[in-house]
Image (cartoon, rainbow, N blue to C red):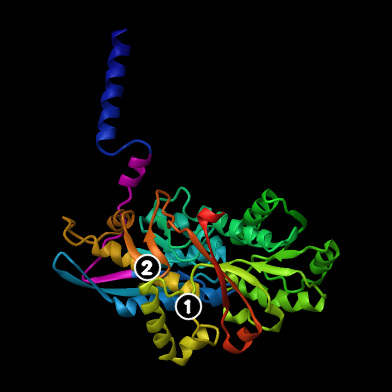
Amino acid sequence: MKKISLLLVLVMVFSLFAVGCGGGDNGGQESDIAGISVEGTTIKIGVFEPTTGENGGGGMQEVLGARYANQLHPTVDINGTTYDIVLEEVDNQSDKAAAVTAAQQLISKGVVAVIGSYGSGVSIAAGSTFEEAGVPAVGCSCTNPQVTLGNDFYFRACFLDPFQGTVMANYAHTEGYQTAAVISQNGDDYSTGLATYFKNAFTDLGGEVVADVTYQTNESDFNALLTSIKAAKPDCIFCPSSINTATLILPQMAQNGITAQILAGDTWENAAIISKDAVGVALSTFFDETDESNPVAAEFVNGFKEYLNSNPQNITWNAGTDTVAAVSALGYDAYMAVYNALAALDGTDIETVNSVAIRDTLKDVSFDGVTGTIAFDENGDAIKTTAYIKTVTEESLASKSFKFVRTQEVEDL
């Protein structure tokens, strides 16, 4: 009995020692993450985006937003030292495997925070790399809930797909559409996730999904798929896809004589899809450049247009127009979230700027952003309550811009 009692005492002492040193469940894991510290007076922020592949167009627009923010805010003062902020850019190629390699490249470069990515799949794939290195990432338009779920180092500036899917289902319902077809990409977290949220919300509203079809990554011939959809005679078709897929499937829909209302998510808000075949398309997105209710947004729009027009290459990267894409605004806001987190270190007793310390201040960041107030909940998700519905009109063909339809508030759903 005495031996057992002594053993119990030793176990209790060891347990208390472990707790006192930060051991235990979540706290123990985080205390073991040293993170990356800034060397000298240069702070490196990673830009983790696809600039090639099926999402390269949208990824480049987020890069432009981050570059513009860095141009306006290239330095930060922390405890009497002025630090230069340098962007380290990598191309995750719109590919999950390449995304992990790209994330590892950023860590090896010594970045202390990351912006990106366009595309939920690549963001999810790289999430553990950032988490294990103790480097916080702020996604711009990666809307799938899995991006931040269970990852204390991933944040995002956009709304989530459960909200976006419900927005588009409600739009379909209020427009009087009773039947819907859904097209999604196999293995793509964004496409399949958003499709599921739309289907659930649409059926909850009394609608019927009469066709639910999928296609493979890099597929370009959708005729067989569209033939089956046409036979189902849906009132509307919801197609959350990449920009590249949109430019391929829209003309094939026209060639197949499909007249149903086409609905899509935020990825379609890119001037590359605007064509005669896209007229009538309705989509949800995060921002509209004509919204004058936010003075921060108005100032951003004017400055960003000047920035785009200052270099012909910027216009090329922006799908041949100086229209302000919502993802560019989110790229700007994501940079500013990191910037505000860095600024919050001023006045603290921190000896060196460290990625874990930046993560800690990110949790309490709150500021007026271009896309609305930027603040994060306990999951690292932006507290966003508004979506913008836009469409393509005949006038869009000349202006290369989308027409604003209306906003959708979360309380209205």
Q: Position of residue 30 (x, y in %)?
A: 34, 46
Q: Residue 343 got which mark? A: none
Viewer-closest of 413 and 237: 413
Q: Position of residue 40 (x, y in %)?
A: 21, 70
The magenta-colored residue range is 26-44
Which one is earlier in the sequence, the residue at label 1 or at label 2? 1
Residue found at x 26% / y 29%: 16
Residue found at x 45% / y 59%: 384
Q: Residue 369 got which mark? A: 2
Quarter holding the C terminus is: bottom right
Label 2 crowd (10 A; few <14 / some 14-19 / many >=20): many
12 in relation to 269, above or below? above
Q: Give the labeled residue for mark 1.
A: 290
Task: State left or right for residue 320 relative to residue 187.
Answer: left
Q: Position of residue 310 (x, y in %)?
A: 40, 91
The mark lying in front, picked from 1 and 2, is 1
Quarter holding the N terminus is: top left
Mark 1–mark 2 CB contact (< 8 Å): no
Residue found at x 44% / y 73%: 329
394 in relation to 43, above or below? below
103 in relation to 403, above or below? above
Dot 2 falls on a residue whose secondary structure is strand
> Hey, which residue is sitting farthest left in the picture?
80
Q: Amino acid at mark 2?
A: Gly
Residue 111 visible in the displayed image: no
